[in-house]
Image: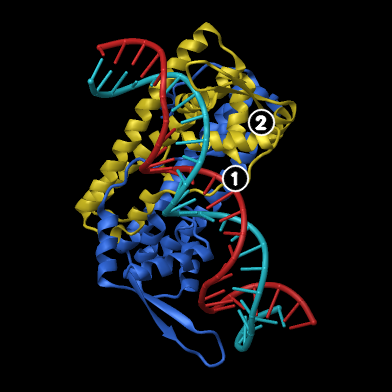
Chain colours: A blue, B yellow, C cyan, D red
Amino acid sequence: MSLSHAILGFLSLKPMTGYDLKKVFDRSVRHFWPANQSQIYRTLSELRSEGFVEQEVVEREDRLDMKIYSITDPGQQELNLWLSTPLPEQDYREAFLIQIYFGGKLTDTDVITLIKHEIKNLQSANEQYTAMLGLYRGKMQQNPTRELFFSVIPLEYGLTSNQSALNWLNKVLDRIETGDYSIIDPIKSEPE
Amino acid sequence: MSLSHAILGFLSLKPMTGYDLKKVFDRSVRHFWPANQSQIYRTLSELRSEGFVEQEVVEREDRLDMKIYSITDPGQQELNLWLSTPLPEQDYREAFLIQIYFGGKLTDTDVITLIKHEIKNLQSANEQYTAMLGLYRGKMQQNPTRELFFSVIPLEYGLTSNQSALNWLNKVLDRIETGDYSIIDPIKSEPE
DNA sequence: CTGTCCATGTAAGGCGTTACATGATTGT
DNA sequence: ACAATCATGTAACGCCTTACATGGACAG
């Protein structure tokens, strides 16, 4: 399961509290693996019962106790195994495409509205990717490491695939507006 | 929820059994919205209790009863409303990208294996898309309708985005093999 | 005579979401 | 005074998956 392994991955960098993990997720992998707070706490206790993490309880007089989690040796092994094992084809769900699939039941105006909305969603995601890429560029100039390189790759992936989706959605808008319903060959028509 | 609306969409084309629906899903939208059998039967009974579909029981002497579902007027309204309402940004989960994100913990060989595996997965998906596109092309030549056009769009979408992912993954392989860890700008480097 | 197709479901478990609950500290 | 941040969790619900269960018809 990916969430538990992502948590192990972050804990292998340094020990953290559940709260810290939530922040780290939101600042790094949320675009390709969002995690919410209650999920993180639940998964941490599962990982602990499996022996993959251990917790150090820090008692504090005036505040709630703080629990700092670290990865154990079995946890490291589990992480390395999962990271290096290729995954089978994953299911993919895109509700927007269902709407388009049944677009025959809608007016052109409605379909165009749907597509323009999707374009906005993709653009907003891309703005976030670009902002994050900027941060990484700064880090890379100071200290270009192999680790950093691999953590940037998913961002580039998000940007490229969104960008090609955007290009393609704009073409679809043209085809709807001109009433050109012929099928195109996406691969052949791409390199332009 | 998308599954129930996809079911309504198919039933709006013609009445069907749960078994038929499963086949229709597998032959059309499974690439962007897979559905399994038990899910379909459960959702059908929910839709019935909401009054969006109704069933006709066909008793057969020698076999099990067959239940043919059709969409009701409230179901049509619900479908049209859902289809024409833009969706908010959806969560996106891609476990492969988590593996890459933590690629710093792996050897180059391991990362390359992961990527080549992903390339194979994408290629196999694209072969299926291409085969389906071929079928649609045949239908379109006989009878080019607006409905047909919209049902092809998601296939083209899958093909284009997979193709751009493939192109990009191949570039990543080059960068790993040459040890070139500089960050590229995916958007600027795309049109080549 | 073995497997695949037709056709129906139930049960249990896993993963994810939303909402609720607590309570001190720090910033505006 | 009010909101945000730090820090912990629980409860309930919803969606999806896997496995189980039934049983005739038909093709190789």
Residue projecting furthest to the top:
B142
Crowd band around label 2 with a 10 angstrom C-alpha radius: few (<14), some (14–19), many (20+): some
Q: Which mark, by number, is residue A80?
A: none
Image quarter hosting the N terminus of chain A: bottom left
**In the image: residue A32, left or right of residue A128:** left
The disc labelled 2 sits on which kind of residue? Ile
Q: Nearer the viewer, residue A40 or B61?
A: B61
Name the residue located 48 percent from the left edge and 19 percent from the top edge: B63
Q: Are marks 1 and 2 on the same chain?
A: yes
**In the image: residue A162, left or right of residue C20:** left
Q: Nearer the viewer, residue D11 or A97?
A: D11
Residue projecting furthest to the bottom:
A61
Mark 2, residue position: A112
Mark 2 — on which chain does it sit?
A
Mark 1, residue position: A121
Q: Is residue A69 above or below residue B120?
A: below
> Residue B16's spot in the image, x, y percent?
57, 21
The answer to which of marks 1 and 2 sits earlier in the sequence is 2
Dividing the picture into quadrants, the one containing residue B46 is top right
> Residue A66's spot in the image, x, y percent?
48, 82
Q: CA distance from mark 1 to mark 2?
A: 14 Å
Mark 1 — on which chain does it sit?
A
The disc labelled 1 sits on which kind of residue? Asn
> Residue A77's spot in the image, x, y percent?
24, 64
Name the residue located 42 percent from the left edge and 84 percent from the top edge: A57
> Residue A164's spot in the image, x, y percent?
47, 37
The secondary element bearing badge 1 is classed as helix
Image quarter hosting the C terminus of chain A: top left
Can you see residue B120? yes
Q: Nearer the viewer, residue A57 or B173?
A: A57
The secondary element bearing badge 2 is classed as helix
